[in-house]
Image (cartoon, rainbow, N blue to C red):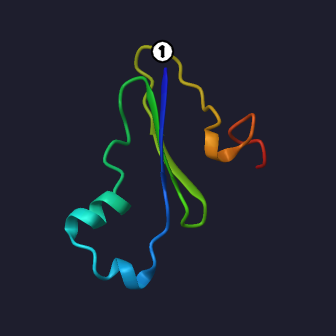
């Protein structure tokens, strides 16, 4: 099993108005949501939200805590 995550900072609205398509895609699009036997997540500083996908094919997947959460279990504070 593999857990992947990406940490993204929020953009200032005035800055985002000047972004081209490539920059918008880099900062706001999550291209790799589902991959076989992987958990993929993006931790966004917009409302401190985590978005992701998991696709178990050949093995069970576990939702593991990622470093930015600073918690022993993924849903520890929920």
Q: Quadrant of residue 33?
A: top left
Residue most extreme to the right: 77
Residue positioned most to the left: 21
Image coordinates for residue 66, horizontal then vertical, percent: 61, 38
Q: Vertically, is 58 above or below 37?
A: above
User: Vertically, is 2 above or below 12?
Assistant: above
Residue 3, above or below 76: above
Q: Residue at x 32, y 82 (%)?
A: 17
Place of residue 56 in the rendered image (x, y in percent of width and height, measured from the top left)? 45, 24
Badge 1 marks a residue whose secondary structure is: loop
Q: Residues within 10 Å of mark 1 (few under 14, many from 20)?
A: few
Q: Is residue 16 left or right of residue 22?
A: right
Position above or below: 28 against 64:
below
Number of numbered discs overlaid on the protein picture: 1
Q: Quadrant of residue 75?
A: top right
Q: Viewer-proximal residue, 62 or 48?
A: 48
Residue at the far top: name it: 58
> In the rendering, at what x and y percent does residue 22 appear?
22, 63
What residue lies at 49% left-to-right and 68% top-to-bottom?
10
């Amino acid at each position: 099993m593999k857990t992947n995550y990406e940490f993204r900072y929020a953009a200032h609205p005035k800055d985002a108005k000047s972004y081209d398509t490539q920059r918008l895609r880099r900062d706001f699009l999550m291209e790799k949501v589902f991959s076989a036997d992987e958990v993929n997540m993006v931790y966004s500083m917009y409302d401190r939200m985590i978005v992701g996908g998991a696709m178990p094919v050949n093995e069970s997947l576990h939702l593991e805590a990622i470093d930015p959460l600073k918690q022993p279990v993924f849903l520890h504070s929920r």
